[in-house]
Image (cartoon, rainbow, N blue to C red):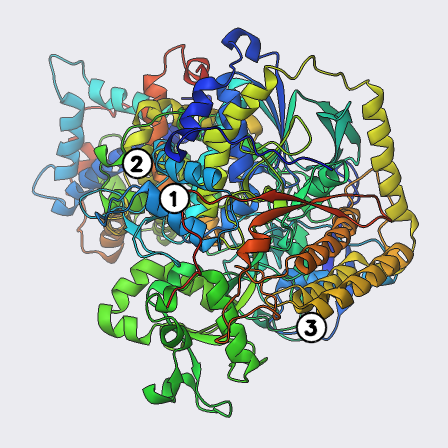
Amino acid sequence: MNFKLVIWRQHGPDEEGSFETHEVAGIDPDASFLEMLDQLNARLGREKRPSIAFDSDCREGICGACSLVIDGTPHGPQQVTSCQTYMRDFVDGATIKVEPYRSNVLPVIRDLVVDRSALDRVIEAGGFISTTTGPQPNPNAMPIAPKVQEQAMDAAVCIGCGACVAACPNGSAVLFTGAKVTHLNLLPQGQPEREDRAFNMVNQMDEEGFGGCTNFGECSRACPQEISLDVIGMLNREYRKGAAAQRPKHRSEMIAQ
Amino acid sequence: MIKLDAKIPEGPIEDKWQTWLDRHSLVGPRNRAGKNVIVIGTGLAGSSAAASLAAEGFRVKAFCFQDSPRRAHSIAAQGGINAAKDFANEGDSVRRLFVDTMKGGDFRSREANVWRLAQLSENIIDQAVAQGVPFNREYGGSLATRSFGGVLVQRTFYSRGQTGQQLMLGAYSALQHQVAAGNAEVFNRHEMLDVVLVDGVARGVIVRNLVTGEIERHAGDAVILASGGYTNVYYLSTNAMGSNVTAIWRAHRQGALMANPCYTQIHPTCIPQSGEYQSKLTLMSESLRNDGRVWVPRSPDETRTPGDIPEAERYYFLEERYPAFGNLAPRDIASRAAKTVCDDGLGVGGTGRGVYLDFRDAIAEHGRDTIERKYGNLFDMYSKITGDDPYRTPMMIYPAPHYAMGGLWVDYELQTTIPGLFAIGEANFSDHGANRLGASALMQTLADGYFIVPHTVTDYMTRSGDAVGTDDSAFEATQDKVETHIAALVDVGGSTVAQDFHQRLGNVMLDKCGLARNAEGLTEALGEIRRIKAEFWSDLRVDPGVEELNQSLEYANRVSDFLELGELMCHDALRHEESCGGHFREEYETPDGEALRDDEHFAKVTAWEYKGDEGDPVPHDEQLTFENIKLATRSYK
Amino acid sequence: MWRSTIGKKTIVAVTGTILIAYLVLHMVGNLNSLFGPGGGEPRIDWYAEWLRTFGEPLIPYAGVVWAVRAILLGAIVVHIVAVVQLRTRNRAARPAEFPARRIGRSWEARLMMVSGVLLVAFIVFHLLQFTTLTIDVTPLEAGALYANLYNAFQEWYLVAIYLAALVFLGSHLRHAVWSLCQTLGLDSPERNAGIRMGANVLTLVIVLGFALVPILFFTGALGEPPADELSASLTTLGGGS
């Protein structure tokens, strides 16, 4: 298969970027999108031209490193990660536009590579259960109904790729944050910090500069893990309870172990 | 001659770890903030170690080359994690898990370590649950378990097919918790390029900031390498693109011995390769073998679609050859059996390098719903990648390089031969012998990270002496060395990208040091690798610009180490003149094609010493003793 | 609550709920005109008077009406200010024009800003016409509600303006109702289909309820006001005075 690629090139975070056109030929339909880019990079190397920087690691859809915007859609047309997007999903001879995520909170580092550390900081604000290593209670002493476990798991499968932020017209991270809050707040282990968790994570999210939710639902439709919008409802609920429960205390107390 | 002292405590095996714990020295709570620990890699082992040490009050710096600690490749582990909890009431015990692991490893691992692993396995589950890991539950709300390859009990705990992800997120959140508490600091997009030794003791590391290209010095009272395994030496493997040997290889070059590097695991259930362009192979969880039946057509000339082939003309080779374990035979055995039938021309798929994994009977017996509940996400993943529907047509699978049992030699305290330098998780060699059983990698990484290394590092730091500042001349010298190496890569100025060399290396390794090896092939491989290496250093193309994000440089740097590792693996495979576990020497097999061990000469660990770019590596032996388990021919028949 | 995006969204949802509740009351009140001109005093006129005298003598004349007006004004102002602030924030969160491709966003959701602005414009127009009687293109008289409605809705363009406004209202509500359930966290997987359906039904009921009045007047289904209607009212409209 042959394609014309219109790829975003940007040398550094503070530099202007622009689109650059490359043609690739003889691509196997079963090659993944990233393998197609590998082939392009190998050719650029042979021609002694600078290769295109993009993130990827596991290439099986679970690590969340890959982060392309293909033809205007985060990860591409199939609602799977960029690494699991295959060239057979495109029309032979097509022109494909490849860009980085566009969010002022996830700035471009180079070409198609963006800085997603803001998402780590949201987790740092409360996306954990404050336990430390050591003797723990017998897990069967705290039974969890399979249904609850399933619901928690549906949210816990978030891979933190940030496609939700990229898809959101508001650049909001509520699906990401909602997934973590839903996972932990549904489980009995998460109850003691329940209110603080939602409150602190939302505050951090706002502090980072992510936009707010207007319930467009595009995040969920771009999510390769198909995380449901319900996690946002849960986040809203938990945040409200959290805000109501707030007194001057919170974060410092929560992490003082 | 280096004397390898494993420092195994005296006494009965059940009590060794407790004996060690009771005796080890402690750092008082007030003094901990003055001690700095460097952790390289943030997978399960690295994150759990970093979080545990930070929670105790030590100052921890954790480094990962990914953009977030959560992306480390532990996240991709699918099937589950073993623990000797006996929740299934099958009479399981620490001893049984110990025996299974020793036997699974073909008696090439250290008894005391394995026993400790089995003991600690129980705590890991408790720890993970407390962190909010959503393990699958039974209807009553208790933890669910399932069986895995190589064992006869159901001791594997799981979170759907994403157990690694959930455990990884648990460890990652524990680490972020400590970052929030101010005890730990994470350096993402930082890659370790060397360890700094002062008077032979590890005192810090040199890392490259992958975004700015800046070479940074970080000093620590102890350095923990948790950088994972090296099966990317085969180019195509189930590892992540970035998985590399650099951290442990640079430590090896500085004097840490590398143990059993040729012990690599080729995992039986991977999606077969479809073309040259392919950058990695995808593993399908071994748990699929619980319900899937592995077969090939009996006739090499078979042309019918799998569904049309009648029962009598299907060769269920695992069930026929290993009736007791059948489709649940251990990984090394299942992989080799698949290779054998494909060598005999019975393989299926476009390349003839594939066997069927068929769920027809399981669906008929248990219903589609049950199968979907158990394996739904794996089936989805398979159909996403191949475009086939495994509910209707059998999956096709083929073995692929997956895990490195070999790694840095460590003693009972997980300390390498360099004082102050520890290696945990897949980066060390310790617990899996010559073959790892399913669902025990997660167990080992977390046992190392949560429960062992925090204590052994603490003990070490009570006598590590004063810390050394980054202005020490050793830091300067090591940084110079690193910068010279980077400059050398850029300065080659050729026109072949690192990927091409990597691919060529991988082909040689897979062909001659893969599922089956022989002396002739290994000797040839040594020559070929040297040739590839010479070409690498004369025709490599790396993007210019070292003071910026430069992925071609990162990749070339890793390949330069894989090339050296490949050679060492061949040396090691040549020296092990026996077949055991994942190491199968064609010269040493039983008449019916099984591995032929030579316990008299090779019941030992081979740890290699680096002797410079020109010199040949020198092997050192650690004799293994078997007091709690009888050496026996491994049989799964 | 005001500081965070989610808190502010909650406030938007709560004020929205107040406005929707008022719409329902207003719509039900309007339906009084369906009783037609009646014998002497049309029912709608009686209803208007009843609203004003509600609670007398405990509450001063037209007290309830003014209280409701104050609440509504407050709700609208808070609603708009919060939305504008959120929008400014959202714009700052990403470069313009991205993402380039929309994924299944509903047109109602996309038009929230447009429909909102048009609704504000309409409300001003509506108040100027029927409350302050400023836009007096048809003969309008204080207190004579039925007559005023009858006369106004004989004009096709006024009917068109009101129906158009209802289209925007429907569009706004369809996203708003389910969205506020989401924002207030009332949703759950089991309830979501019901919430979506409920949002549609509520929207439809409100829009149809409002649409009925101009349509029935225009088509002549509701007859002319009684002759003495024009002089029937001795009271002045609270808002019109």
The kind of residue tagged 3 is Ile
Q: Residue B62 location in percent, x, y?
A: 61, 30
Using the image, determine if residue B311 lies above or below residue A54: below
Taking the spot 62% from the left edge, 70% from the top edge, the residue there is B587
Q: Secondary structure at mark 2?
A: helix
Three-letter residue code for mark 1: Ala
Residue under label 2, please give it.
A186
Secondary structure of residue under mark 3: loop
Q: Residue furthest left?
A: C39
x 29%, y 37%: residue: C20
Going from N to C along the chain, the mark reached first, 3 or 2, is 3
Residue B630's label in the rendered image is none
The answer to whether mark 2 and mark 1 are in CB contact below 8 A is: yes
Separation (CA) of disc 1 from disc 3: 36 Å
Q: Amino acid at mark 2?
A: Leu
The image shows residue B519, relative to residue B537, as above or below, that is below
